[in-house]
Amino acid sequence: DVNNPQQMTEVIQSCIGTKFISKWGDLACQIALEAVKTVCIEEGGRKEIDTKRYAKVEKIPGGRVEDSKVLRGVMLNKDVTHGRMRRRIEKPRIVLLDCNLEYKKGESQTNIEVMREEDFTKILEIEEQYVQQMCSDIIKLKPDVVITEKGISDLAQHYLMKANISCVRRVRKTDNNRIARACGATIANRTDELKEEDVGTKAGLFEIQKIGDEYFCFITECEDPKACTILLRGASKDVLNEVERNLQDAMAVARNVLLEPRLVPGGGAVEMAVGHHLTEKAKAITGIQQWPYRAVAKALEIIPATLIQNCGGNTIRILTALRAKHASSPNGKWSINGETGEIVSTDELKVWEPLAVKLQAYKTAVETAILLLRIDDIVSGSKKKDKAEGDAGP
């Protein structure tokens, strides 16, 4: 059940139980689950969860790992362009642009010959009018915040500041897309194309905060955001990088389960159960056809055998006992406890794996084996050819 946080936490917990972040396991599960559910979109009956693009991890050294959280919105490492602009706005109207707010330079090199003095002032006037026109197009919509991917000239800043609008410039394209999804705005390529419906009104708060020596811009408290930022705090950069890697794994698990909510028991239970079925199937087949089944069954037993070996158990004895358990119980719910090396029921162990991952692992293993055998054929064939040529020599 995807909507049961208890079950989801159990699944994610089995992914991060052995990693660095396991100390803060509950927090990590909560963050991963919240982030994945935020960016989940259903279109035409299918789910799309793009954690790579829309769940950005921002790492800020300092503070404790417990202070990490998921922001219902976006955070940028930027400050407003002018010191006198507002730094905190509640319920802001946000306009997103993908163009310069400065006079357009000529495409190729342009030379202007100025003969009279007043011509020069005229050129400057035209530039000013152009910038003023762009600003008035924006001011017409009465926004509170303007965010652009390109630059903003001093003159444009002056006009916008007079209209009490805060500006943020040179924002990354990916960040701009996330802001658009969080606050419901549309990115405009030209100021004269701006319409009322392009303004984002779903954000609850725009504010600039100073963390350490740097300024960060927060656009948060969005209603139903489809993008989020995961804010990680930690003692040093190395700790943060490690926590980020572990969180990515946790998010991938949450995503896989949401897309296909089927699980299989871990701890070598699946491998033994599948191996047992294959061995039974092999017994029903006569002749050479049964060997592939036996080979796959034997290969699958490597996983529980490795688990036993890792915790210092007697591999052959425990594996034989496990095989007997699986043969006697049809539901195949027996696995290895990776810490003690004992055989326990999967309900006790609570290690679960997404079915999608298991299926992919088996497919890849079989395909890789085929690939290696093919290469082997080619190599052995070329050796024979070399020998034949050598024998034909004088």
Image (spheres, rainbow, N blue to C red):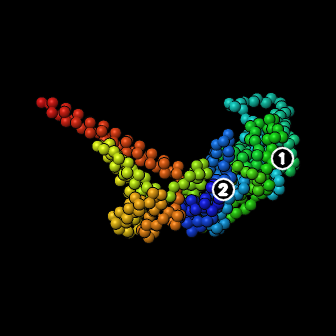
- Residue at image x 70%, y 57%? 71
- Residue at image x 67%, y 50%? 39
Q: Could you say which quadrant of the image residue 6 lies in?
A: bottom right
Picture coordinates of residue 148 (x, y %)?
Answer: 74, 45
- Residue contact at pointers 2 and 1, CB within 8 angstroms: no
Which one is nearer the viewer's eye here, 167 or 71? 71
Disc 2 to disc 1, how far (Cα)? 38 Å
- Residue at image x 56%, y 52%? 262
Dot 2 or dot 1, earlier in sequence = 2
Which one is nearer the viewer's eye here, 132 or 74? 74
Q: Crowding near pointer 2: few (<14 within 10 Å), some, many (20+)? A: few
The kind of residue tagged 2 is Asn
Picture coordinates of residue 373 (x, y %)?
Answer: 33, 42
Which one is nearer the viewer's eye here, 267 or 343? 343
Q: Quadrant of the N terminus?
A: bottom right
Picture coordinates of residue 86 (x, y %)?
Answer: 82, 55
The kind of residue tagged 1 is Pro
In this view of the protein, can residue 70 be seen by the observer? yes
In the rendered structure, the answer to whether residue 347 lies left or right of residue 225 reads left
Q: Quadrant of the C terminus?
A: top left
In the rendered structure, the answer to whether residue 373 lies left or right of residue 76 reads left
SS for callout 2? loop
Picture coordinates of residue 35 (x, y %)?
Answer: 65, 55
Query: Is 70 rendered above or below residue 153?
Result: below
- Residue at image x 65%, y 59%? 4
SS for callout 1? loop
Residue that extends furthest to the bottom in the rendered view of this protein: 340
Which residue corresponds to mark 1?
Answer: 143
Query: Is 195 rendered above or below residue 365?
Result: above
Q: Nearer the viewer, mark 2 or mark 1?
A: 2
Which residue corresponds to mark 2?
Answer: 3
